[in-house]
Amino acid sequence: MISFETIKKIFIGFGTLICIINIISISFLSDLDIGSKIKNIAFVLILFLIIWFILYKVIAFIYKKYEIRKKY
């Protein structure tokens, strides 16, 4: 069974990778002015962090529930 610390590291790693890809794609692949790029990057990062946090909490809840059930 994968430990919860490993799951946290995987989440942080994939989250960082997706954030970097989003920043690069918005920065280099769009023809927007600098103000619009900054707004888009901020919006994407905030939206991503909210979704990632919710996913993380759901997986943490399921994992802890499974651990409690496994003990008894």
Image: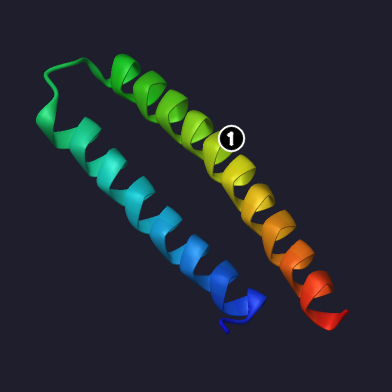
Q: Which corner quadrant of the image does residue 53 belong to?
A: top right
Q: Which corner quadrant of the image does residue 71 belong to?
A: bottom right
Q: Mark 1 points at which residue?
A: 50
57 lies left or right of 8: right
User: What residue is at 34 percent from the left and 16 percent from the top?
Assistant: 35
Across and down, in percent, residue 5 comes to: 63, 77
Residue situated in front as seen by the camera: 46 or 57:
57
Mark 1: few, some, or many residues within 10 Å (few <14, many ≥20)?
A: few
User: What residue is at 57 percent from the left and 46 percent from the top?
Assistant: 55
Q: Is residue 16 above or below residue 35?
A: below
Exactly how many numbered labels are in the figure?
1
* Quarter containing the C terminus: bottom right
21 lies left or right of 3: left
Q: In this view, does 43 lie above or below 21?
A: above
54 lies left or right of 27: right
Query: As drawn, which residue projects farthest toward the front?
Result: 72
Residue situated in front as seen by the camera: 69 or 44:
69
* Quarter containing the N terminus: bottom right
Q: In this view, does 22 lie above or below 14?
A: above
50 lies left or right of 16: right
Query: As drawn, which residue projects farthest toward the right?
Result: 72
SS at mark 1 in the image: helix
User: What residue is at 74 percent from the left and 55 percent from the top?
Assistant: 61
Residue type pointed to by label 1: Ile
User: What residue is at 43 percent from the left and 65 percent from the top?
Assistant: 13
